[in-house]
Amino acid sequence: MRVSDNVRPLRRPPIRQQTIVRSDRAHTFEVFVRDLGSWWPTRPHSLGQDRVTAVTFERRLGGRVFETWSDGTEVEWGEVIAWQPPERFAMTWTILPAVTEVELSFTELAPSLTRVALEHRGWERLTEEQLAAATSVPGGYSAGWKSILEIFARTVEAAAADPRDGENSR
C-alpha cells in the first residue's frame, strides 16, 4: 500500500450565516441583487475601498458581479452560476487566490418574513498561507458575512416600510 492511498484531501467546512428579514421573499431577493450597489458596505468589504463608485450584479446565469472604481476600473467578484429568483442564486467568488463559491437562499417563513441563508464554500482550494491571509481580519470571512447580512436585513426592512419603494420598483 502506498502512503498516498491513505491521504485524504483537507476538508474545510463552509462558512454558513443566516438572517431573518421582515419582508416578503420576492422583495428581499430583489433588494439583494437589484440594489446591491446601494447597500453593500464597500468599506471595508471591497477591493477598491473608497475608490468604489458602483457594485453591479448582472441578474442572469453567467452574469458578472463586479465593483467599479472612480477611474472606471472594473474588478470582478465572480460570476453567477445558479439563478433561480426569488429562491436562490450562487456565484463564484474570485476575490481570493483560489475560486470559491457563495450561495444565498431565500426561504419564505410567512407572508412578510424571509430567512436568508448564505453558504461560502470551497475553502479547501486555498493553501494554509492563502487561508491565513484571507481571514486575517478579526473574525475573518465568517464575521464579515455576518455583518453584511445584518446590514442587508436593515436595508430591506427599511425599504419594505417605505411605501415609495413599491412604486419605484414596478
Image (cartoon, rainbow, N blue to C red):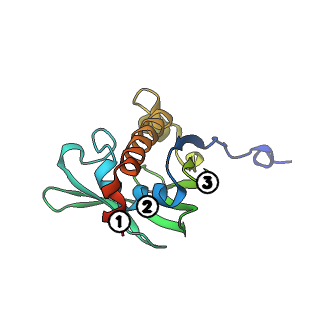
Total labels: the figure holds 3
Residue 1: percent from left, percent from top:
86, 48
Kind of residue sitting beneath label 3: Glu
Q: CA distance from mark 3 to mark 2?
A: 14 Å
Residue 83's mark?
Answer: none
Mark 1 residue type: Ser
Crowd tier of the residue under label 2, counting other residues whose Cα lies within 10 Å: few below 14, some 14–19, many 20 or above = some
- Helix, strand, or loop for circle 3? strand
**Kind of residue at disc 2:** Glu
- Disc on the earlier residue, 2 or 1: 2
Q: CA distance from mark 2 to mark 1?
A: 9 Å
Q: Residue at x 30, y 38 (%)?
A: 44
Residue 83 or residue 76, whichever sits in front: 83
Pick the residue in front: 19 or 97.
19
Residue 8, percent from left and from top: 74, 45
Q: Do tag 3 and tag 2 residues touch (Cβ < 8 Å)? A: no
Is residue 111 depicted above or below 34 in this figure? above
User: Seen from this angle, which residue lies furthest front?
Assistant: 163
- Label 3 crowding class (10 Å Cα cut-off): few <14, some 14-19, many 20+? many
Secondary structure under badge 1? loop
Q: Quadrant of residue 41?
A: top left
Residue under numbered circle 2: 30
Camera-near label (2 vs 1) is: 1
**Residue marked by disc 1:** 169
Relative to residue 31, is residue 15 drawn left or right? Answer: right
**Residue named by callout 3:** 108
